[in-house]
Amino acid sequence: MREYNVYFSFYSEEYGNFDDVHYPVMAGSPFEAREKAWKLCDEDSETLFRSNIRQFAVTWIPNKLDAGDYFYTHASDIKCSLGALLNVSIPNDHIRGGENKNRLDAERCSCLSALQTLNDVAKDLYADKGINPPSIYEELHYAEKLCEQLGWNEKADALWERMEKAKKWDAGAIYSIRNIFKEGYTILCGKTELVGEHFDRNGIYPVQNKTDEYDFDYIYRWQHKPKVDSMRKLMFFKETNVIKNSSDHMVYYRGQVLLMDYDKLKKKYQTPENLFWTATGPSENGESDKNGVFYAENLITGECTDCFRGAFSGILRPDIVARIDFDALKNEYAAIYCEDTANDRGTGDYDTDTEDDEFER
């Protein structure tokens, strides 16, 4: 048993970007560490606000008396740097428009070159002593499990033969084995074999929380989206536009943009200008926000009142907030309000409801 660090990447629903975190795990092997780390991930309260969760590396301190372990450890360190680039830095750069594309591509190539150099050194020094290519140390372990999953038929035999070639330092076989776990498929006996379904947290290669989540789905949220700068566009906002789980766990709600639930408003207040609010402090009546009550300001009308947490669908996602031109909405509302006020003065028709009547209780 020794300590391993298992690295996860994820999309932060709260901050609207990709990030990473690692958990220390006591285990007998890096393979066991991967399995155990999922429990620690589940126990982390921050996981509630994370999507597209995947493991991208396991690292550990090498046993310097074991040549194989020494090389495998250094390979895992390089793959950790590569994984951070592929799962965090590069997707974030896509969100920002690709301003650092050339630099990140150069760093990715540098990591791949470092892996190849490590393989070359290990081959020169220890190939005749049975050491496997360090760059595919983990992949060979999981490829063997894939053979078991295939049922030891002709496809499994073809994969096993490729593994044996890779262990003998065949460059094409090494590339092919590594590519299986990068792309989620391979060619066996002349046919495409899809294996990505085995990459979920309970599968052969337990690296993804869900195998149907992709970086592009989250990058797309930020791309080619029109600005919201008029009241008529506000009616399109709904519960899918809020941070997941934020309605039930509004721990960080203060200062955030909160989306009002239309159904919690009285009929005559179900208008676009009452959609967006932000918490500004404790209840004016002295009620604690722990009881679900806080003082909030309408971000369009500027009105302030006590609100119940249950009146909101949740915290608006950062990519949605970035699209909203609150200044334009305030100006449009002010112009409409001034016109309506002028008309009311001419007719003597005034609204006698107070702020407290705005919300259904």
Image (tube, grey):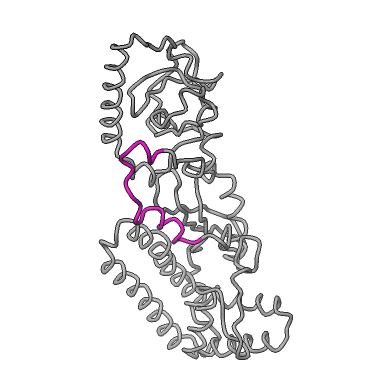
Residue at figure coordinates x 37%, y 53% from the top left: 222
**Of the pair 60 and 222, the residue shown nearer to us:** 222
Residue 155 is covered by the magenta coloring: no
Q: Position of residue 164 (x, y in %)?
A: 59, 88
Q: Is residue 103 left or right of residue 179?
A: left
Within the image, what quadrant is residue 92 found in? bottom left
Q: Is residue 243 left or right of residue 31?
A: left
**Of the pair 174 and 251, the residue shown nearer to us:** 251
On the rendered image, what quadrant is the C terminus found in? Answer: top right
Q: Position of residue 342 (x, y in %)?
A: 27, 17
Q: Is residue 305 left or right of residue 331?
A: right
- 81 relative to 269, above or below: below
- The total of numbered circles placed on residues is 0
Residue at figure coordinates x 51%, y 31% from the top left: 261
Q: Position of residue 157 (x, y in %)?
A: 67, 88
- 232 relative to 200, above or below: above
* Segment colored magenta: 214-234
Q: Position of residue 10 (x, y in %)?
A: 47, 54
Within the image, what quadrant is residue 186 found in? bottom right
- 190 relative to 27, above or below: below
**Of the pair 212 and 110, the residue shown nearer to us:** 212
**Of the pair 58 and 285, the residue shown nearer to us:** 285
Residue 222 is covered by the magenta coloring: yes
Within the image, what quadrant is residue 351 found in? top left
On the rendered image, what quadrant is the N terminus found in? Answer: bottom right
